[in-house]
Image (tube, grey):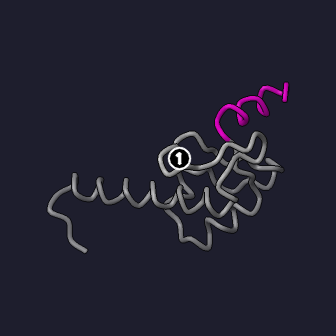
Amino acid sequence: MGYKNKQDLYEYQKRRWVNRKVEAILYKGGKCAACGIEYNGENGAIFDFHHINPEEKELEWGKLRARSWESIKKELDKEICLCSNCHRLIHSQKF
């Protein structure tokens, strides 16, 4: 899989990472576990993955997204899918 230049490689990686996040959102049920807002095909940027037990966390999404799907699923099984608002509320300790 050759690339003409670094820009082509970057574009491929970007598409792959977006697709991985969509797969992850759908794997976790396709909606926020707190408020229920659903993934609609265009709002993937609003979803985060929150570790239920932070001590079990092995990798952040930024590093995890480049791993194999099996590695991603293993980590996602320790997490819940949240919209960014609910995720912030949880971390603010007011939720």
Q: Position of residue 82 (x, y in %)?
A: 70, 44
Please state which of residues 20 and 58 is positioned toward the viewer in this rendering. 20
Please tell me whether mark 1 sits on a helix, a strand or a loop.
helix
Residue at coordinates 53% horizontally, 47% vertically from top-left?
44
Depicted 78 relative to depicted 36: above or below: below
Q: Quadrant of residue 46?
A: top right
Residue at coordinates 37% horizontally, 57% vertically from top-left?
15
- Indicate the quadrant containing the C terminus: top left, top right, bottom left or bottom right: top right
In magenta segment, residue 84? yes
Q: Quadrant of residue 30?
A: bottom right
Which residues, given as a range, are shown in magenta? Answer: 83-95
Q: Main secondary structure of the magenta part?
A: helix
> Label 1 sits on what residue type?
Gly
- Indicate the quadrant containing the N terminus: top left, top right, bottom left or bottom right: bottom left
Q: Is residue 26 left or right of residue 56?
A: left
Q: Is residue 31 left or right of residue 45?
A: right
Depicted 25 relative to depicted 88: above or below: below
Q: Position of residue 26 (x, y in %)?
A: 61, 60
Crowd rating for badge 1 (residues with CA inside 10 Å; few <14, some 14–19, many 20+): some
Q: Residue furthest left?
A: 4
Depicted 68 relative to depicted 57: above or below: below
Q: Position of residue 23 (x, y in %)?
A: 55, 63
In magenta segment, residue 4? no
Q: Position of residue 66 (x, y in %)?
A: 49, 61
Q: Mark 1 sits on what residue? A: 44
Residue at coordinates 61% horizontally, 56% vertically from top-left?
25
